[in-house]
Amino acid sequence: MLTEDGGLDTTSEEYRRLSKAERRKRRRATPKYRNLHATRERIRVESFNMAFAQLRALLPTLPVEKKLSKIEILRFSIAYISFLDNLLS
């Protein structure tokens, strides 16, 4: 039921008799699907990490070489935004 490139042969009679859930399950089990999914997830995580790095770069007075966790970056950002808000009030 797999094609030469690792995809599913969706034209086979056996494939058409499967329920939608079973078809989806088999489609997700193919190496081609797993590779595509892994690539998309890798790009998503890289984008997420770049956004945190950009946010981290905007925080003042912290040593750049000090590694902060994502939750620390968010907490420092919240505190800094609150500080700036108080300055404007």
Image (tube, helix red, strand yellow):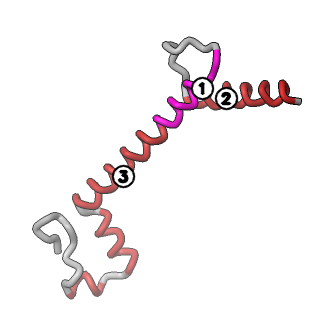
* Residue at the image position 17 percent from the left and 64 percent from the top: 6
Q: Amino acid at mark 1?
A: Leu
Magenta part, dominant SS: helix
Vertical position of residue 14 compared to residue 48: above or below: below
Q: Quadrant of the N terminus?
A: bottom left
Looking at the picture, how far across and down is residue 20, in whole percent?
A: 38, 79
Q: Amino acid at mark 2?
A: Ser
Magenta stretch?
49-60
Q: Is residue 76 left or right of residue 11?
A: right
Indicate which label's residue lies in the foreground, 3 or 2: 2
Looking at the picture, how far across and down is residue 55, in whole percent?
A: 57, 31
Closer-to-camera residue (79/27): 79
Q: Earlier in the sequence, mark 3 or mark 1?
A: 3
Label number found at residue 40: 3
Looking at the picture, how far across and down is residue 63, in whole percent?
A: 56, 12
- Toward the left, the furthest residue is 4
* Residue at the image position 32 percent from the left and 50 percent from the top: 38
Q: Amino acid at mark 3?
A: Arg
Give the residue number, with chain letter if any, for mark 2. 77
Vertical position of residue 79 compared to residue 24: above or below: above
Q: Kindly check if marks 1 and 2 are in contact, taking CB atoms under 8 A apart as contact.
A: yes
Q: Secondary structure at mark 1?
A: helix
Q: Quadrant of residue 13?
A: bottom left
* Residue at the image position 60 percent from the left and 26 percent from the top: 58
Q: Secondary structure at mark 2?
A: helix
Q: CA distance from mark 1 to mark 2?
A: 9 Å
Closer-to-camera residue (4/81): 81
Q: CA distance from mark 3 to mark 2?
A: 28 Å
- Toward the right, the furthest residue is 89
Other residues around mark 2 within 10 Å, as few (<14) / some (14–19) / many (≥20)? some
